[in-house]
Amino acid sequence: MRVLIAPDKFKGSLTAAEVADHVAKGLTGAGAHITALPLADGGDGSVAAALASGFHPLPADVRAATGDSHRTTVAFNGDTAIVEVANTCGLVTLPGGKLHPMTASSYGFGQAVRAALTLSGRRLVLALGGSASTDGGVGMLAALGYRFLDRAGNLLAATAANLDRIHCVDSRHAIDVTGVDVVVAGDVTSPLIGLTGAAAVFGPQKGATAAQVAQLDHGLGHLVAAFTRSGFADAPGFARAAGSGAAGGIGFAAMLLGASMASGAEYFLDLLDFDRHATGADLVITGEGRLDHQTLHGKLPAAVAMRAAPTPVIAVVGRNDLERDASTVFTDVFAVTDYTDTDTSRDPLRTAELLRHIGTQIGSRFTTSV
């Protein structure tokens, strides 16, 4: 019996590697041959999944969301570097978890990008999940050498609060990424501005009030005009493009750098060589923190099931919000919440214990029947 365990993270609880490890421990008594392949979808946890899959770590000192220096990691495999917003300047880097919607910056992400560009790889993958800022990517661009000026030619701090003061953009001394294949791997389809844009959709999650959402949206529109005024003729088109609103507008800034957009789940399945690992498997176990209808529309577990077919695929999740009679792509679903009356979403020890139990259940139920 050959089993491939290929989950996403349980957000706020366990990494993808930890999920795979604990399920595998529960399965050991079933005598199965187990392969673990921690996965990601381009959001937070992408670097950790890549490292667990054999990428090498590159430490980098960067600014957190509010400017404090800390050490992060870039994943590199000799050809591809993966840089992540979450572990550089994302929500998890906010001191005490306090949200700063107008001053949180993407500068640290730009510093990590600079570090990745020293590695001489041909491909740079930007993982944009878990961002704390809505600065249109000006922080990232400032770290790459872009300068943002007001009408009088004065240099402005690259913050969300200054977006509506930017009159022109000086890119003469910016780092040249020509020759690097820059890819944004994710599934956010929001444009930069408007009712479905970065500020309106994601601003409240980052602490923005209604008035601040309006200010941020206006500022992002002003930023597009400033780039257009400064010779970036494609800026208006990028601002309307699907995905430009990702990570508070870092998607827009990435497009200005020449980035292409790719489905996060599918891209990372290819990057981490899922098809090769799945070849010959008798059973595939995938999962994520919460299973719902969004899962069935392109999120990682569903993509795993589609790729693995006709091999049976079991989903192991923290919580299952699908109706019991809902048709899914999974052979079976095991949810941590079905084994406890307590909330384990922020309790990694209890979650790990229950995942081991679920692994044992899967082993006794499926290894003799598949």
Image: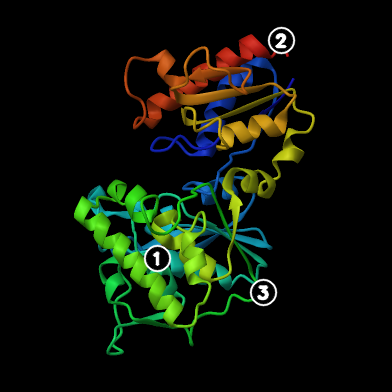
Element type where label 2 sits in the image: loop
Rendered residue at 51%/21% (across/down): 356
Q: Is residue 225 left or right of residue 188?
A: left
The circle drawn on residue 2 is none
Q: Position of residue 289 (x, y in %)?
A: 45, 31
Of 214 and 134, which appears nearest the observer?
214
Of 294 and 94, which appears nearest the observer?
294
How many C-alpha atoms fall within 10 Å of the one at disc 3: few (<14), some, or many (≥20)?
few
Q: Nearer the viewer, mark 3 or mark 2?
A: 3
**Quadrant (top left/top right/bottom left/bottom right) for the C terminus:** top right
Residue 119 placement: quadrant: bottom right
Element type where label 1 sits in the image: helix
Residue topped by disc 3: 179
Q: Position of residue 130 (x, y in %)?
A: 40, 49
The circle drawn on residue 108 is 1
Name the kind of residue labelled 1 in the image: Gly
Q: Position of residue 5 (x, y in %)?
A: 63, 30
Residue topped by disc 2: 368
Q: Is residue 31 left or right of residue 139?
A: right
Label 3, label 2: how far apart the Cα atoms are: 52 Å
